[in-house]
Amino acid sequence: MSSAPAPPLTTPFERDPRHNTTATYAECIAFYKELAAAYPATMQLRAAGPTDSGQPLHEVVLSADGTFEPGASRAKGRPILFIQNGIHPGEPEGIDASMMLARDLLRSQKYRPLLQKVTVVIIPAYNIDGMLNRNSTTRVNQNGPAEYGFRGNARHLDLNRDFVKQDSRNARSFAALFQKWRPEIFVDTHTSNGADYQYTMTIIPTQHNKLAPALGTYLQDKLLPALYQGMDQKHWPMTPYVDFEGETPESGLRAFLESPRYSTGYAALFNSIGFMPETHMLKPFGPRVQATYDLLTTYLETVASQAPALLAARAEADRALAAQTQFPLAWALDEQPSGTLQFRGYEAGHKASGVSGQPRLYYDRARPYVRPVKFYNNAHATVVVQAPDAYLIPAEWTEILDNLRRNGIVLRELPQPLTGAAETYTIEDYKTTPRPYEGHYLHSQVKLATRPPATATLPAGAYLAVLAEQGPAKRYLVEALEPQATDSFFTWGFFDSILQQKEHYSDYVFEDLAADYLAQNPAVRQQLDAAKAADPALAASGPAQLEWVYQHSPYVEAGYRRYPVLRWLGAAPH
């Protein structure tokens, strides 16, 4: 460790006797710069790419012996603990807690040995844009701090919905940083909304069924019990995130099925175990920061003590991914609870609203309780796909190609035309949100028609993504390119141009062509007659029958609703 005299590094939170102050962006980065200058042998502060604010995303790396790169860290058997703060800067506990944690890891004899076993990576503030947009009113339900940042970034994007679409420069820089480190444990600090209850800290782990079996079992059997026990010992009883379908938590807590649009769902695609700690908004800011600090130290202590088991589970998950051929694309919670947990809540009731006079919900803190509640923590896949041997992406879809590269996908540019067996999708039906969501109109309930394998030719310059070459990014590739996946590129509207027909017909002209076509193709006439017999509405409508003929004729627009990414079947060319 550095022999330099320890500077009197304290945070704005610590200097406030009321503990109701969170650091500004300038104060936060200045603190880390001072810390890095004092301990250059054990800490590095580095710019890690641009953000929409114009300020760089920062990467803090803490290592006991100056092992500041992922390969060197893993060569020494050290897992990576990656902590991200301020994705919602109005929820800033992690910003302040991580500042104190970084200092204490470098200065405290108690914590120094932990850095011999774990490398710690910290993003001091992810949504710099929102952190600079400081106010004291937008978190109206929250008990402090006095001022804080805004949830949206400079483009009014919620960055915790941006991990697949990556509209922001923040998300693009994060992807490069995450791919560089591919941490074993990823922690994204937050503050909750919702019900009132006794806990200061709640936690959302990656849903265990969505992880590879080795990681899911390790999470449930070893990691989570140790985290809960560690927080109990620090006098912070903890509970799963308080999400429920009824009016109050007694209706049963439900695990949060984070999809890849969220940070922890994105992390899970790469066999990283993700956590989203959520402090309780109604508790004072001081205890919330302290609970976050204590949870972060508990992660560090637990990862250090369980490093061999964690690394073994990750290695087994990577081996399983390499052999995996079927991939879940969408999930749902089981209808039956997985068990019960002892919940520390407050009795709820109803009283007349001072605004409307109508009954309103309230929680009575004078009436705490501890009682069992059902916990719904098991999930099952609702859509599963058999992966192809490779995906073929035409060169014109540059936004898709850039996104794939950014997330670790190996792409081969075809030096010459490629002919072989491939499946194609046609988008038969889908639903679209009536209002924009994070800058997009999302699609759902996608129904596909799969054309059986046929000989297809792609021109030189197209790109081949071979699944066997993707390593830990294999699952990401499938969920990004399969249209029925919850957060696929199709879901987010990146292929919307294929959903608009570009050519059609004038009825009075096509009537004669259609009649001639039916006369020359009696089998098509028989199909039309059968369709009319099965569908009275079609039988009663001349325009509908004309459209039917068009859709079954060579005049139909081939590219309309034809998904442009092909599923390659068979060995890839060398």
Image (cartoon, rainbow, N blue to C red):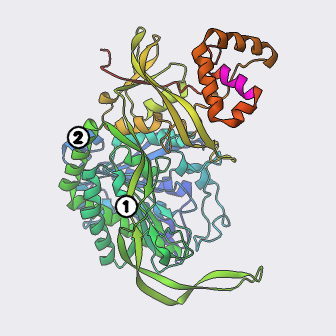
Q: x%, y% of residue 312?
A: 19, 50
Which quadrant of the view contains residue 353?
bottom right
Give the amino acid type for the residue marked by disc 1 in the picture.
Answer: Asn
Q: CA distance from mark 1 to mark 2?
A: 24 Å
Q: Is residue 413 left or right of residue 184?
A: right
- Asked if residue 180 shows in the view, the reply is no
Q: Which residues are magenta?
A: 543-549
The quadrant of the image that shows the C terminus is top left
What SS does tag 2 mark? Answer: helix
Q: In the rendered view, tell whether residue 384 sits above or below residue 294.
A: above
Q: x%, y% of residue 318?
A: 26, 42
Is 119 one of the magenta-colored residues? no
* Mark 1 or 2, nearer chain start: 2
The residue at the point 38 percent across, 64 percent down is 377
Q: x%, y% of residue 508?
A: 81, 16
Give the residue number, with chain letter if any, for mark 2: 319
User: Given the current orientation, which residue lies at the most extreme bottom position?
Assistant: 366
Q: In the rendered view, tell whether residue 445 sits above or below residue 28.
A: above
Q: Main secondary structure of the magenta part?
A: helix
Give the residue number, with chain letter if any, for mark 1: 378
Q: In the rendered view, tell whether residue 251 sits above or below residue 351.
A: above
- Asked if residue 450 shows in the view, the reply is yes
The residue at the point 19 percent across, 55 percent down is 309
Q: Residue 465 or 88: which is nearer the viewer?
A: 465
The circle on residue 352 is none
Q: Residue 419 or 171: which is nearer the viewer?
A: 419
